[in-house]
Image: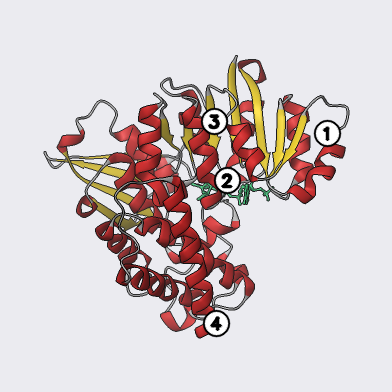
Amino acid sequence: MRRVSIFGATGSIGQSTLDLIGRETNRYHVVALTGGRNVARLAKDARRLGAEIAVTAHEELLDELRAALAGSGVEAAAGAGAIAEAASRPADWAMSAIVGAAGLLPGLRALEQGTTLALANKESLVTAGPLVIETARKHGATVLPVDSEHSAVFQALKGEDIASVERVILTASGGPFRDWSAERMAHVTVAEASTHPNWEMGQRITIDSASLFNKAMEVIETHEFFGIAPEKIEVIVHPESMIHALVGHNDGGLIAHVGPPDMRHAIGYALNWPERRPLPVARLDLAGIGRFSFEAPDETRFPALRLAREVMAEGGLAGAAFNAAKEAAMDRFLAGTLGFTGMAPLVERVLDRMSGEGSLGIDRFSLDNVTRIDAEARAIAMRQTAEE
Ligand code: NDP
């Protein structure tokens, strides 16, 4: 039996992971499941799968979790420290699917045990890529990409020499506002931004997809994970979301990964790696689909892609500042105190200020300096709020 843990088990990626694990319970022993506010779902899945421990991020919900697990034999715990402790329990494979920078620490703890980490939490690589890669190396652990684009690149690179890679092309659906004017985008509501044309995902990544901040994160993630130079990473809008990424080699050939927009493919690939096993995802009917279309992204209406290049050029802790400022900007958008098109300018102001002050350079990556810059960037984003 493989020992598995899922961080962010109650979310979209977590539930898709449990769907796959729940189909073959004889293959898996569930060590830890972690969640946030959805204690009922966490307890139900922990009971159903016979988890050793269930942890909510919120200490005030511990009594509720204990009550929901009464008589099950599943241990209950709460708080960020308890999630990190649960992530330190020996497991063969763990899914990192907490949303936001809160996903970094549990991932690092799992890597320190030598656990194979399936990484959906792209914030880990954007904020602390070198730390994640170094921790895995030091402890003989493996990191597997779960973002569909990065899983696609990983699969397209199988058996290839990375030195022959001329470019990596990430596809973007373009989101719900692909054809909207800048004026119309200024009045986008939270409900409009929370609906994706092709993918069913958590609210934050859905809004990030609508602003192309998600693609900006993925460009940085590609650079950090595969070590591909920023100038070799391209983004193309492909509204059908069937081609997930393409790898271009120095002989002019492109290797594409094509599949239905169902995260269980990328999750299942990481779960079964290095094997391939049958997965319950739809098979594409290419004649029925008829055609694939492509267009260049519009960086005037979607400045996040330009910001990603600036972050990579700055290096150091710029990714941590970028992600924290982006999360703070989204908090404001969700609270109704910042317009949809106000998010990118706010992130840019935070980055400009921190870069101008020389705060983003470092000699060495550590969790402490990532955490410090994350907090500073959020505080500046909040002060910018007050100054506006
Ligand atoms: P969801 O919002 O659906 O789920 C997030 C999970 O994290 C939930 O279990 C939630 O708990 C938990 N959580 C929220 N805040 C905290 C916190 N502070 N501490 C601990 N746990 C917390 O997100 P998704 O599943 O969509 O995304 C998860 C990650 O995967 C993100 O990094 C995203 O960018 C990435 N990803 C997602 C894809 C997708 O298709 N959804 C595709 C590629 C990458 P609760 O709900 O109980 O409050």
**Left or right placement of residue 212 versus residue 159 in this view:** right
Tell which circle, 3 or 1, labels the residue nearer the N-terminal end.
1
Q: CA distance from mark 1 to mark 4?
A: 44 Å
Q: Answer whether labels 1 and 2 touch (C-beta < 8 Å).
A: no
Q: Answer whether labels 1 and 4 touch (C-beta < 8 Å).
A: no
Q: Amino acid at mark 3?
A: Ala
Please name the residue that numbered disc 1 is placed on.
Answer: 69
The residue nearer to you, when weighing 92 against 120, is: 92
What colouring style does the render use?
secondary structure
Q: Nearer the viewer, mark 4 or mark 3?
A: 4
Q: What is the quadrant of residue 234 in the picture?
A: bottom left
**Could you say where residue 375 lies in the image, as x and y percent from the top left?**
50, 61
Q: Answer whether labels 4 and 3 touch (C-beta < 8 Å).
A: no
Please name the residue that numbered disc 2 is placed on.
Answer: 98
Query: How crowded is the residue under tag 1: few (<14 C-alpha within 10 Å), some, or many (20+)?
Result: many
On screen, residue 194 above or below 181: above
Please name the residue that numbered disc 4 is placed on.
Answer: 386
Label 2 residue near ligand 1, CB within 8 Å = yes
Q: Quadrant of the N terminus?
A: top right
Tell which circle, 4 or 2, labels the residue nearer the N-terminal end.
2
* Residue occupying the point 44% across, 59% down: 373
